[in-house]
Image (cartoon, rainbow, N blue to C red):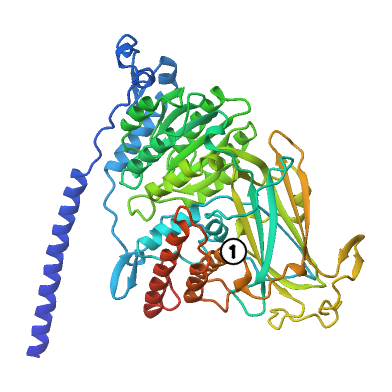
Amino acid sequence: MNDVHKQFTRSALAIIISVIIVSGCAKESKDSVKQSQPQSISTIQSTSKIQSASEADSSAQARHELHEVAGLVITSEQQAGLYKGSAGQYRSAKVMTSSMQPHILSPQHVSVSDGNLSLAPTVSDKLESVVQNGNMVAAETPVSTFSIDVDTGSYSTTRRLINQGQLPTKNTVRVEELVNYFSYDYPAPTTTEQPFSVNTELAPSPYNVDTQLLRIGIKGFDIAPDQLGASNLVLLLDVSGSMSSADKLPLLKQAMLMLSQQLSAQDKVSIVVYAGASGVVLDGVAGNDFTAIKVALSQLNAQGGTNGSQGIQLAYQLAQKHFIENGSNRVILATDGDFNLGMTDHQQLVDFVASQSKSGIGLLTLGFGLGSDAASYNDHLLEQLSNKANGQYAFIDTLNEARKVLVDQLSATLLTIAHDVKVQIEFSPTVVSEYRLIGYENRLLNRSDFNNDAIDAGEIGAGHTVTALYEIRYNDSHNRLVDPLRYGQSQSEPVSGAKHNNQRRNGQLSSANEVAYLKLRYKAIGKQDSQLLSYPISRDQQLTHLHQASDDFRFAAAVAGFGQLLNQNDYVHDTDYAKLITLAETAMGQDRFGYRHEFLQMLKTASVLDGQVMMTEPDTRWVSQ
């Protein structure tokens, strides 16, 4: 009985001590919140003052009346009237932000790696899951149709997570964006009559025994940056409170300075900022006025809610105002995608930018920040906005990535050479039993969409390379996933010895040796009607061994394999990190900028992280609600 009494006393003391500690922590948290309340936004200098920063002597003679609305300095009576309606929203957002309690980290945000706790991607980060492409039976569904995709955001977000010690959750990696992050040495177009070349390669697949990998490669014609036409760029910059961390607004400013260094006097640059309200900071200055752009960027501070929709509307108004005929007209949206004021219905935002793209204004979305516990990163929204607005999406996690997108690949970023590029491939059931498209899950089209010019598809920029991969099984494969039908027409006859035997099928002359028939449609710049390109793919192209394939083929296969492992793909049975590392190591090529070597290091790190996860939780990468 005495032991029970002692045990009870110890338990009671433990509870009392815990209460005292928690109370002290709570008080400290409240004090921390008070200390960390946002300071007032530094006012932004007037447009006329900033634009004349490079001519300091004459700027003193031209002063305009300033009107401060929601922490922004607006440069005219008309603009002040436009934005007064948003001041209330801004003040409400500011009060709401200041009064927010500190977020308590829940066990669902924590993963275990080698006995240590580390942060997993926050539950609020919106990394949309994709439904894996299945294995298709060629005799039942011989046609596959999809839109091209030149976005690279999924690669950078994956790299960011791995560098933070985490693997992406299942099915959140867009494999095609990993593959298309890299440039490939595909042949350039041989004629000016079409904007890109098309080539194919066929070799054994590294993912499954007795399967083949078909690579489709597209290469757009290139143009030197100094030969680019005039550009009208509106920089739409998120300066809300969620952008305060070092990897967001500070990195954004540096990225925009990099871009401005590439521009010339023929270009026009405007800057629109948004938080609780939006305002114009620069209104169509010359692209080579680096001082004005630098001064404008230096004034920006992060605070307030995120009324992104109002900023987008204002940015497109400026893009229309300074529209350059036969030039590149583009809004560049730089944000973490955490829109919480104004038009918060994301479908409305997507519909709005889609309607604006019809007037010849594209959209480049640049994402900043991921894994922050203070604000969510909306990868899905930024990707969808660029998809529907004739643009592209990139995630900027480092200054090197900013240089890649805005300096090294500036021509591809700013100059579109073909619109609505669609791919359709018909597999021959006499040769192919099954096929599987790797990636492009959210770019799939209906078969009838291919010939419908009203259906939107992806754009390709100058110098862009686009790669698509299909894993296929021949009829004579010993590793078919689907049994042939007992009562269906047999398609399992091997084709050896029938290389020159032609047959007529559905009114079209086809070769019994053809693996597939590839078709592409695209719209030339300024044209409304699409043009058709067609290419037969023969089994004669088949290489016997994977090592005989080009460096580009093997490297793309390694990258796609990596994406499939991260997604825990249900159709990959004969590969692992060790095999992919070996494959990538033998396919580095020239690698001018070192991106392939960086990938190899990331692949090795992911292999270690995967091993840690398998030791602690075999079926879980990280736990989420």
Whether 145 is drawn above or below 355: the answer is: below
Image quadrant of residue 140? bottom right
Side (left or right) of 457 relative to 305: right
The residue closer to the viewer here, 38 or 466, is 466
Regarding residue 505, the answer to whether it shows in the image is: yes
Whether 369 is drawn above or below 301: the answer is: below
Quarter the C terminus occupies: bottom left
Residue 193: x and y in percent read: 74, 40
Side (left or right) of 11 relative to 498: left
Residue found at x 52% / y 54% = 181
Quarter the N terminus occupies: bottom left
Residue placed furthest toward the front:
590
Image quadrant of residue 59? top left
Q: Which residue is mark 1?
A: 131
Which element type, helix, strand or loop, lies under badge 1?
loop
Regarding residue 625, the answer to whether it shows in the image is: no
**Label 1 neighbourhood size at 10 Å, few (<14), some (14-19), many (20+)?**
few
Residue placed furthest toward the bottom:
1
Side (left or right) of 208 relative to 140: left
Residue found at x 35% / y 43% = 251
Residue 336: x and y in percent read: 42, 46
Residue 368: x and y in percent read: 40, 47
The residue closer to the viewer here, 409 or 25, is 409
Residue 42: x and y in percent read: 28, 30
The three-letter code of the residue at mark 1 reads Val
Count of marks placed on residues: 1
Whether 69 is drawn above or below 366: the answer is: above
Residue found at x 46% / y 41% = 407
Whether 436 is drawn above or below 47: the answer is: below
